[in-house]
Image: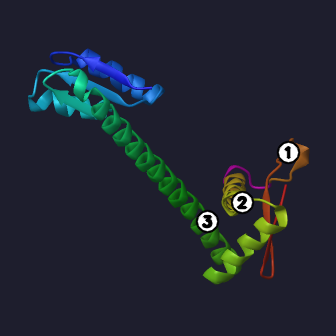
Amino acid sequence: DVVIVDSESPSRDTLEHVATLSERNPRPVVVFAEDDSDEPLRLAMQAGVSAYVVAGLQPHRLASVLRVAIARFEQDKALREQLARARSELSSRKVVERAKGILMRSVGLGEEDAYHQLRKLAMDRGAKLVEIAQRVIDATNSWLHSQTRRSHVEDADRGYVCTLNVVVLKGRTAHIFH
């Protein structure tokens, strides 16, 4: 599927509709226009237009213009997917690094040992490394939060009931209990 817009000069409204379409249902978009000024071209590209053709719609050029627009769209799509993967990987690495730091400070492990403990725990639990790392962070945050809110978390006589993910560190092995 290709979206084709034929206009003397695409208006802001038209380009906003194209941008909305590109966000909701990405498709190659080709604009045929008579206006060769920079501003409409720049706005069209920002809206997600794959090809902007000046001098109108000419049947003998249509097939090649559509092929170029589809190729450009696929290339842009691949780059967006690659960027999303890179951002996700970076986010995961930050979570793992933070969890390693917690283990290094709490137990006195070296960086490599902290990583191996997280990795072993992930393998033992059949979970992803980033999931285990996030559990360590969440458990630490919960524990720290409970320590600042209450002087004694286990005071059942006062009605405090607190179920936390707890990180228990024994020697050089980290265990996460639910």
Position in image of residue 134 (x %, y %): 67, 57
Q: Nearer the viewer, residue 125 or 109?
A: 125
Secondary structure category for the residue under label 2:
loop
* Mark 3 crowdedness (10 Å alpha carbons): few <14, some 14-19, many ≥20: many
Secondary structure category for the residue under label 1:
loop
- Give me the residue at 38% from left, 31% from top: 28
Checking the image for residue 115, the label placed there is: none
Instruction: Give the quarter of the image for residue 2.
Output: top left
Which is more N-terminal, label 2 or label 1?
A: 2
What residue did someone put label 3 on?
96
- Give me the residue at 44% from left, 52% from top: 83
Instruction: Give the quarter of the image for residue 77.
Output: top left
Report if the CB atoms under discs 1 and 2 are less than 8 Å apart: no
Q: Looking at the image, is mark 3 or mark 1 nearer the viewer?
A: 3
Checking the image for residue 128, the label placed there is: 2
Magenta segment: 148-152
Position in image of residue 106 (x %, y %): 68, 74
Give, as a three-letter code, the residue at label 2.
Answer: Lys
Q: Is residue 20 magenta?
A: no
Q: Is residue 150 magenta?
A: yes
- Give me the residue at 22% from left, 23% from top: 32
Which is more N-terminal, label 2 or label 3?
A: 3
- Give me the residue at 82% from left, 47% from top: 162
Name the magenta segment's main secondary structure.
loop
What residue did someone put label 1 on?
161
Q: Nearer the viewer, residue 106 or 39?
A: 39
Left or right side of 103 for 175:
right
Secondary structure category for the residue under label 3:
helix
Give, as a three-letter code, the residue at label 3.
Answer: Val
